């Protein structure tokens, strides 16, 4: 991997990451830098591992080897709620529950920011 970025500008990084499902390896020895404030596109034919890479970057699919870091910290060290405040993944074929209102679906995305005493309020809708 060749990186022209200053390492301080790298927000999300993989180094030597291998990803797969069950006994099947999908991607091996991947190194990717995603800079702060960048627009990054992952393109390729169907079945080449784009979604697998995104799942690995988000920590949904654990790496078999290598490291994934966010702001220089391994994503495995983040508590789930803390990681959800920094990273989000919207799958290509997400399935919303039948009959759910858009406002209710959006409110679920606010869950990482809510505590036991800080729930969804009308004022939150203006954010």
Image (cartoon, rainbow, N blue to C red):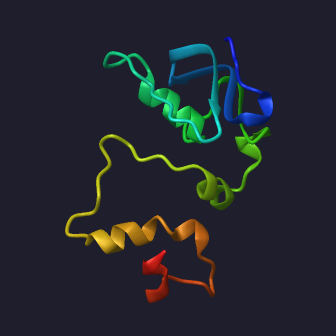
Quadrant where the N terminus is found in the figure = top right
User: Residue 114: x and y, percent?
Assistant: 59, 75
Q: Tell me if I can see residue 121 in this picture.
A: no
* Left or right: residue 107 compared with residue 2: left
Indicate the quadrant where residue 117 lies.
Answer: bottom right
In the image, 94: left or right of 109?
Answer: left
Q: Is residue 6 visible?
A: yes
The one nearer the camera, 63 or 71, is 71
| Residue 106, percent from left and from top | 38, 67
Name the residue rendered at 65%, 24% in the picture.
64
Q: Is residue 62 above or below residue 64?
A: below
Residue at the image point whose x is 53% and y is 16% from the top: 27
Which residue is at a point 64% across and 33% down the rendered structure image?
35
Q: In which quarter of the image is residue 41?
A: top left
Seen from the viewer's position, the closer of residues 34 and 19 is 34
- Residue 120 x/y as whole percent: 49, 82
Number of labels in the image equals 0
> Vertically, is 93 above or below 114?
above
53, 1: nearer the viewer:
1
Quadrant position of residue 16: top right
Residue 17, horizontal then vertical, whole percent: 65, 21
Residue at image location 77% in from the left, 47% down from the top: 77
């Amino acid at each position: 991997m060749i990186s022209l970025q200053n390492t301080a500008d790298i927000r999300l990084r993989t180094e030597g990451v291998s990803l797969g499902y069950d006994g099947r390896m999908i991607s091996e020895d991947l190194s990717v830098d995603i800079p702060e404030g960048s627009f990054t596109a992952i393109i390729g034919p169907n079945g080449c591992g784009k979604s697998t890479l995104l799942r690995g970057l988000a920590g949904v699919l654990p790496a078999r080897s290598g490291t994934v870091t966010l702001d220089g910290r391994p994503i495995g060290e983040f508590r789930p709620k803390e990681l959800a405040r920094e990273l989000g993944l919207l799958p290509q074929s997400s399935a919303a529950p039948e009959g759910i209102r858009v406002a209710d679906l959006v409110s679920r995305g606010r869950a990482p920011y809510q505590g036991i005493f800080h729930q969804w309020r009308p004022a939150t809708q203006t954010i």
